[in-house]
Amino acid sequence: MTVAQTTSELAAESPPDVDVRWAWAPVVLVLVALVALVWFGRDMTFYHDEWAFILQRDLSFDGLLKPHNEHLSATLVLLYRVLIGTVGLGSYWPYLAVTFALHVAVAVIVYVVVRREAGEVWALGAMAVVLLLGSGGDDILWAFQSGTIGAVAAGMAAVVIAPRRPGVAAVLLTIALATSGAALAFVAGTALHLLLVRPRGLVWLAIPAVVYGAWLTAFGASAIASPHLIGLAEYVATGLNASAAGAVGVTSLVVGEIVLVALAFGYGWLRSVPLVVVALLASGLAFFIIAGFARAELGPEQATAPRYVYIVAPSIVIAGAVLLARVRRPAGYALGGFVLAVALVGNVLLLADTHDRFATNIVCEQALTPLQRGSAGNPC
């Protein structure tokens, strides 16, 4: 089952009594966002790690299953081999098109969840923020990050649909784990959602666990270092603050901390948190804990990387939209409109910054051979 099919399935589960006046709004929103993303992607081309996949990966067992920075990336290797074999390397747009499509799938999942929990208007606002999530722009404008975005799309879908379709969720998690290690966080979120709603469904998680465990034993164990516990708490806190800040279009960790405190206070005051929101937020926490085991020694600043912010920020956007929808009108709409405006402007500016940074790095790489571009010692 593809991410697109799962997105359609999620939409089918949402409330059917949708105002027809809003029927085309999500489609129009996606089209407008894609125009903006195409503009920001205008100078992008093959960059850094992509060259390692282009030059050194094939469809052999070793080519598919050898770890890349500790990750199993089999589906990403397969994607690149298919694209190289069909459209070649003459244009970067087919590669970015896949990335944009997966990114839209993430935004649609956000839309479906928020619409179900808060209504159409809030869902459109949340979707708009995620579509233009410049705080995670490294993932959106670099086609190599299709692996991360694909894992987020499949992982979030698994968390959301698990109580009703645990078997489908297990398949999605297996695909996600074959794409990026980031999917481990969504395995944790899915397990929590099942534990809270349908404990018997936990048995389905044996499928991704066995598959990933087999890869880990045969290929991945040598690439995974001993867990780093020193600095782990600071790493996790920094990553969560950066993701919360990214959700509202800024990079200030102080703002992110305020956002997280507001969410905790708001849901504590309401004494009611939708279980799907709990599970998605738990996935974000799990991600930084897992990442911290491997990367905490690099310092907490590493947790603020845009490629990490993208993994967690959509869940925070969902939590924020659902909470704001529960604030009494007209205060709720006024506050929501203000947050939406700040988040959209901030994230668009961050997308522009990402474009400029990537464009500079791409120019820098022109002095290197393709093999040097894909090496760990790439100075650009």
Image (cartoon, grey):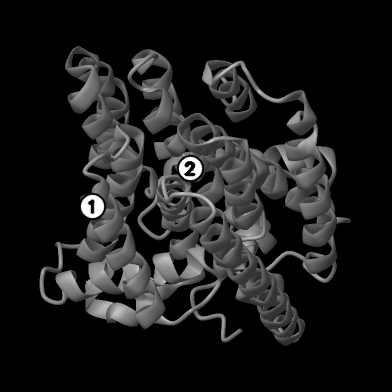
Residue in the picture at 40% in, 38% down? 177
Q: Secondary structure at mark 2?
A: helix
Drawn side of residue 240 relative to residue 105, left or right: left
**Sooner in the amino-acid sequence: mark 1 or mark 2:** 2
**What's the residue at 75%, 33% (across, down)?**
22
- CA distance for labels 1 and 2: 33 Å
Q: Residue furthest right?
A: 90
Relative to 327, 298 lies left or right: left
Three-letter code for the amino acid on which mark 1 is drawn: Trp
User: Residue visible at 25% across and 56% down?
Assistant: 290
User: Which is more toward the observer, 209 or 189?
Assistant: 189
- Residue 374: % across, % down: 59, 69
**Percent x, y of residue 126:** 57, 50
Which residue is depicted at the point 45% across and 52% down? 324
- Front position in the image: 355 or 145: 355
Residue bearing mark 2:
151
**Few, some or many residues within 10 Å of mark 2 (<14, 14–19, 20+):** many
Amino acid type assigned to the residue bearing label 2 in the image: Ala
